[in-house]
Image (cartoon, rainbow, N blue to C red):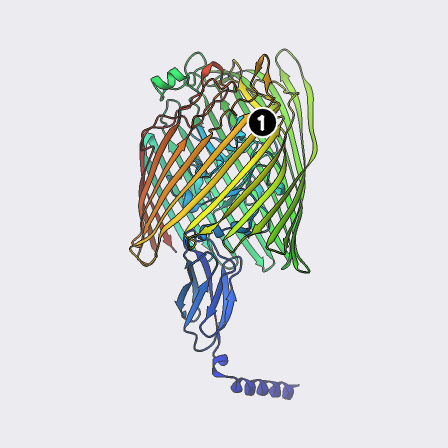
């Protein structure tokens, strides 16, 4: 036995001596490849040594390739990024390579909304992306200004941190809050089973990217009629270990503080972030205070398995100034709603405290077959003195989602098949009281509400000959509410249940690649959107038993691509959306919003995005200069719409501007100085279904200037300042539609300024 072992060792040693020197001295070069703008990992980067050895980076951006003796340089290349050359590294050193996006780099971001993980150029559907570079154009106090750069999308702020989001006119049924738009955070439902989304519990600093699917195109997420928004959380980049602090100050008592620690490695990454934001308020009774603790991480136990976790704790308080009449708006836009039920007198405000916990696992059985499963839970408490009542609610919810993805080759046809399901169940204890100057008084109603919703979905995507990609998808959606009234003055207790039966919502889409720079796409999709709990059970305790779900069909045709040597990018889509049973809202005498179905709406529109890179020279003092613009045309009309004795058929859709446009200029220099200019135009908006009251068109301009510099080996410093509404325009950024008493207007701030400082220290 020992002799045999000696012979084996001797034979191995002899063979080793006969090997060429370049193989005997071979080592491994390892590292991570990241996007230089966002520091997100880049998968599929080709890494080639001058000796000929080659490797591809994985989903973490990690690469490893042999480095024989004589390796003196590395070449990195990836679609949408500038090639980069590096001299060979010190043995044992882990490289951290930052690739600069090319002029068209942002268009090459992978789209996740259809599970095919294709570049935007090869994706059939009307969608838009908002990345960190767009979020950081502004003060980061909210997502509002960044989202409003997207064509076809409008985000409003009726009061500080009181958001309303509309995709292609869905504001119609949202007098407050976010409805008819489904939102996900890292693939986990953020929209609750009752149909509402507490987006204001997040901070803009928590978000890395916003992916917006417009209209009923998000079949994999339940085919609503408004749209789907996918939020990608911020995480530590591979190889990153740093601590960050930041502060910003501005007009009207604006204060914002951030602190965070992040660490990333081959096996795990973690990000812990705390933000606090305070605002004294432009208007009377409009202060805000929000604290968010964010924990986000990913673990890689094996090459086949990735586990993610997100924990969000948020404590939010904001005041509600209330709507103003036209006369009050012109006289003094900074005042709050007055009178017997005035906002100051009633201490109208919102207190929200909650925690969300989400867990997700991706398991890759083979290179072509994988499963992603997520589980989440939340607990939330709401304390809400309103002008006419006082609400106190506690909400608990559990949910889960799972789907399988299979990639197969069928001869000359490549196919991707997706099958999955989702389920949510929430329980809410809801009580309303008389509001006595901000204090709960006599109990009005005491309800227990159980909301259950679920869907199953399937999709097939085929790469056909002649550069055609065909997609067919379908979802089956079901929603049920069970309400137990434990107390109501003068009526007694009873139970009420409403089941919106499962409905199939199909989608078909085709994409044709005309060249390596231009594609055209078309789609037909059906949508089904049941009422939310707040639309069925209004704050005055009324059960709206007649309300039905919306149904609609959308037709789209679009073209996107590049021209002029990739300096010009364009994305243009036209659509026609016919909605049946559209839900509209109006205010009663008590200011309570009530909802009803109208006949139909006919929504025709055009959405366009253009970008042009004037300068793209990283080595020059002026390293980058880009201009861009977005435009939305909305010809939205009511079809058949009769309300009591009034006939609103053919009127313009309430809350929708026929024309909106945003344009910007971005400048960057090699020393680190940057400038972002943004101008936004909004046409007149009808504020009532009768089309008797309109807002005035308005133009606003904002700017941010700063410098970002590396100081020494460890410290990255950014100092910035900015201004909003440089035109000092009087406008309303969150109108109350069909408001009782003509209280339509929620004025936005006049010209205001801010400044801040961010520090990042590499550990």
Residue 228 locus on image (x, y percent): 56, 39
Residue 599 visible: yes
Task: Give 622 or 278, whichever is nearer the viewer.
Answer: 622
Label 1, on which residue?
Answer: 601
Q: Tell me which residue sits at (46%, 29%) in the image.
A: 657
| Along the line of sight, the residue nearer the viewer: 30 or 514 | 514
Count of labels shown? 1
- Is residue 34 shown left or right of residue 428? left
66 shown above or below 263: below
**Secondary structure at numbered mark 1:** strand
Q: In which quarter of the image is the N terminus?
A: bottom right
In the image, residue 762 lies at what x, y percent?
Answer: 38, 55
| Relative vertical location of residue 121 with respect to residue 384 in this rendering, above or below | below
Instruction: Name the residue nearer the viewer: 140 or 460.
Output: 460
x and y, in percent, of residue 301 in the image: 58, 57
Occupied quadrant, residue 179: top right
Side of 310 relative to 536 (left or right): left
| Displayed quadrant of residue 248 | top left
**In the rendered view of the protein, which quadrant contains the C terminus?**
bottom left
Residue 446 in the image: state x and y as whole percent.
61, 20
Disc 1 packing (10 Å; few <14; some 14–19; many ≥20): many
- With 612 as the anchor, is 464 left or right in this view? right
Q: Is residue 182 in view? A: no
């Amino acid at each position: 036995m020992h002799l045999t072992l000696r012979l084996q060792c001797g034979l191995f040693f002899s063979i080793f001596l006969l090997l060429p020197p370049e193989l005997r001295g071979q080592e491994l070069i390892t590292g991570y490849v990241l996007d230089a703008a966002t520091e997100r990992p880049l998968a599929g980067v080709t890494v080639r040594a001058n000796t000929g050895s080659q490797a591809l980076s994985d989903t973490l951006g990690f690469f490893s390739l042999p480095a024989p003796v004589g390796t003196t340089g590395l070449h990195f290349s990836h679609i949408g990024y500038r090639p980069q050359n590096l001299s060979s590294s010190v043995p044992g050193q882990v490289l951290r390579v930052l690739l600069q996006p090319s002029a068209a780099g942002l268009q090459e971001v992978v789209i996740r909304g259809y599970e095919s993980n294709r570049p935007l150029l090869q994706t059939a559907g009307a969608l838009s992306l908002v990345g960190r570079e767009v979020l950081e154009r502004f003060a980061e106090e909210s997502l509002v200004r960044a989202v409003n750069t997207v064509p076809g999308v409008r985000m409003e702020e009726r009061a500080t941190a009181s958001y309303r989001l509309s995709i292609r006119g869905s504001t119609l049924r949202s007098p407050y809050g976010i409805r008819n738009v489904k939102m996900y955070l890292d693939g986990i439902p953020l929209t609750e089973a009752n149909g509402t989304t507490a987006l204001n519990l997040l901070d803009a600093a928590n978000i890395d990217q916003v992916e917006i699917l417009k209209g009923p195109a998000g079949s994999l997420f339940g085919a609503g009629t408004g749209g789907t928004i996918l939020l990608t959380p911020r995480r530590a980049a591979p190889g990153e270990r740093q601590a960050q602090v930041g502060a910003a100050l501005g007009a009207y008592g604006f204060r914002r503080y951030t602190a965070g620690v992040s660490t990333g490695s081959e096996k795990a990454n973690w990000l812990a972030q705390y933000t606090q934001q305070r605002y004294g308020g432009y208007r009377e009774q409009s202060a805000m205070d929000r604290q968010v603790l964010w924990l986000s991480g990913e673990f890689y136990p094996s090459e086949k398995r990735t586990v993610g976790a997100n924990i969000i704790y948020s404590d939010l308080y904001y005041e509600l100034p209330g709507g103003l009449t036209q006369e009050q708006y012109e006289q003094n836009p900074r005042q709050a709603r007055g009178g017997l039920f005035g906002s100051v007198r009633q201490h109208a405000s919102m207190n929200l405290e909650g925690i969300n916990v989400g867990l997700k696992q991706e398991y890759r059985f083979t290179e072509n077959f994988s499963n992603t499963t997520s589980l989440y839970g939340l607990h939330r408490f709401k304390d809400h003195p309103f002008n006419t009542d006082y609400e106190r609610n506690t909400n608990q919810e559990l949910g889960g989602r799972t789907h399988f993805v299979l990639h197969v080759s069928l001869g000359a046809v490549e196919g991707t098949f997706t099958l999955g399901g989702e389920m949510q169940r929430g329980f809410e204890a809801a009580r309303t009281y008389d509001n006595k100057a901000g204090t709960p008084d006599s109990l009005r109603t005491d309800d227990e509400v159980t909301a259950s919703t679920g869907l199953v979905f399937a999709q097939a995507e085929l790469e056909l000959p002649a550069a055609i990609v065909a997609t067919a998808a379908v979802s089956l959606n079901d929603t049920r509410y069970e309400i137990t009234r434990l107390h109501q003055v003068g009526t007694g207790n009873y139970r009420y249940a409403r089941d919106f039966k499962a409905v199939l919502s199909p989608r078909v889409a085709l994409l044709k690649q005309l060249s390596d720079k231009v594609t055209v796409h078309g789609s037909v999709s059906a949508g089904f959107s049941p009422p939310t709990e707040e639309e069925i059970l209004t704050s005055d305790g009324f059960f709206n038993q007649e309300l039905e779900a919306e149904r609609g069909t959308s037709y789209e045709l679009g073209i996107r691509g590049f021209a002029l040597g990739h300096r010009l990018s364009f994305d243009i889509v036209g659509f026609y959306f016919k909605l049946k049973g559209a839900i509209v809202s109006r205010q009663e005498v008590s200011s309570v919003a009530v909802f009803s179905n109208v006949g139909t709406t006919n929504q025709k529109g055009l959405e366009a995005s253009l970008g042009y890179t004037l300068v793209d020279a990283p080595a020059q003092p002026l390293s980058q200069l880009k201009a861009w613009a977005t435009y939305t045309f909305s010809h939205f009309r009511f079809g058949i719409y009769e309300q009591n004795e009034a006939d609103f058929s053919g009127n313009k859709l309430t809350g929708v501007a026929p024309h909106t446009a945003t344009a910007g200029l971005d400048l960057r220099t090699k020393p680190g100085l940057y400038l972002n200019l943004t101008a936004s135009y909004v046409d007149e908006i009808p504020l009532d279904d009768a089309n008797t009251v309109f807002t005035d068109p308005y133009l606003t301009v904002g700017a941010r200037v700063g410098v970002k510099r590396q100081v020494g080996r460890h410290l990255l410093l950014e100092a910035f300042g900015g201004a909003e509404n440089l035109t000092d325009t009087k406008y309303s950024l969150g109108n109350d539609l069909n408001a009782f008493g003509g209280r339509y207007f929620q004025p936005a701030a006049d010209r205001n300024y801010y400044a801040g400082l961010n520090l990042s220290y590499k550990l």
